[in-house]
Amino acid sequence: MDSNEKNIRKEIRRQAIAKNWILFKQSKLGIIGLGIVVFFAFLAILQPILFLTGVWSPAVYDPVVGYESERYDLLVVECPREYPTAKYETPYDCPAEGEVNKVLVFDPSVSVGDYYETSIQPAPPSSKHILGTDSLGRDIFSQLMEGSQVAFLLGLLSATVGVALSTILGSIAAFFGGRVDAYLMRQSDLILMLPFLPLLFIISAFVELKVWHLAVVLGILGGLGGSVITIKSAALQVKVKPFVDSARITGGSRMRILFSHILPNVAPLALLFMVFSVTGAIASESVLSFLGLLNIDMSWGLMIYLSQTDGYIFSGLRYWWLILPAGLSVTFLAGGFYLVGRGLDEVFNPRLRDR
């Protein structure tokens, strides 16, 4: 291939990308989803920048071992045994803001009505901690940034593994057919029959799952499942195109036809599957972390899990900063990738643009 032909191909790819971007911008849902994804990507890279520039001290803002040592003078009160009372309607109202329960004060010289110097954990949002701290004094906003990094790492890695696997296997099944096709299709049927989350529970019982372990497992399960069947259907349509016949007549080998003509033409559909796969990976990690089945330092699911184990998840909105930021992050980032997938679907499927 001479340099002139290479330049022509580069120009064709550049024009195709520019055209697809113009089509994508016409999708309002796609642009909204892209904005959400970019926002969380910004959060993912912001945390290390704050540490490297010295704006944040790891001793205070590290999402795992950081601790806020600021202390406050709190009024010592004795919470009643029965509710409601004139001051407290429910057990969650005592102690109120600026108060501490006498049973939590281990200094015998301190009595009810005295002021006791201690740290408030979990602390509500403040100028120093814009989303407050958890029960161990760790910054929630820093944990949210750490969770963004985990979500992108897990989602993109698992989606890449799954899409690469399903694209290759689906194209091979369509191109070679026969026993190869039959074996790969029965394999996909078997994977589709397996209950997904219970299978992950069983795997986590025998293997210590870390983030990259989970990403590989999710990628393999997704890559061997229904996406293989869909990719195969698209590859079968490409297989009967005239340019494939021309390549075969001119002496192109099976491998050259497969990798030079079949795979590039099913790549748009594979990209679509990749975006949607990220959504499932983020949700799966949140479920496993919430159930304590994932060995991970910090993630959004783990933040919710720690709130639940500390008893704050049933306190209504009193400790909202312990639950809502992580829960909304899972919802919005998963939804953002889904909306991006919807936008890409309109780009690659002309029938959707005509509606």
Image (spheres, helix red, strand yellow):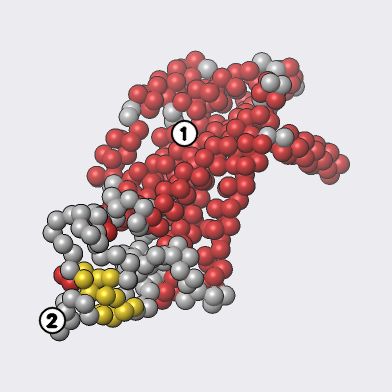
Q: Residue at x 37, y 67 (%)?
A: 123
Q: Position of residue 11 (x, y in %)?
A: 82, 40
Q: Secondary structure at mark 2?
A: loop
Q: Nearer the viewer, residue 261 or 268?
A: 268
Left or right of 111? Residue 335 is: right
Q: From the image, tell me which residue sits under label 2.
A: 108
Tell which residue pokes out farthest to the bottom in this image. Answer: 109
Disc sitting over residue 315 in the figure: none
Q: Residues within 10 Å of mark 1 (few under 14, many from 20)?
A: many
Residue 113, image x and y in percent? 21, 77
> Given the image, on which type of amino acid does mark 2 rest?
Pro
List x then y, in percent, for residue 290.
32, 48
Q: Is residue 94 left or right of residue 22?
A: left
Q: Residue at x 42, y 24 (%)?
A: 188
Residue extending farthest front: 86
Residue ID for mark 1: 223
Toward which corner of the image does residue 310 lie, by quadrant?
bottom left
Q: State which tag comes first along the sequence, 2 or 1.
A: 2
| Front residue of 322 and 284 | 322
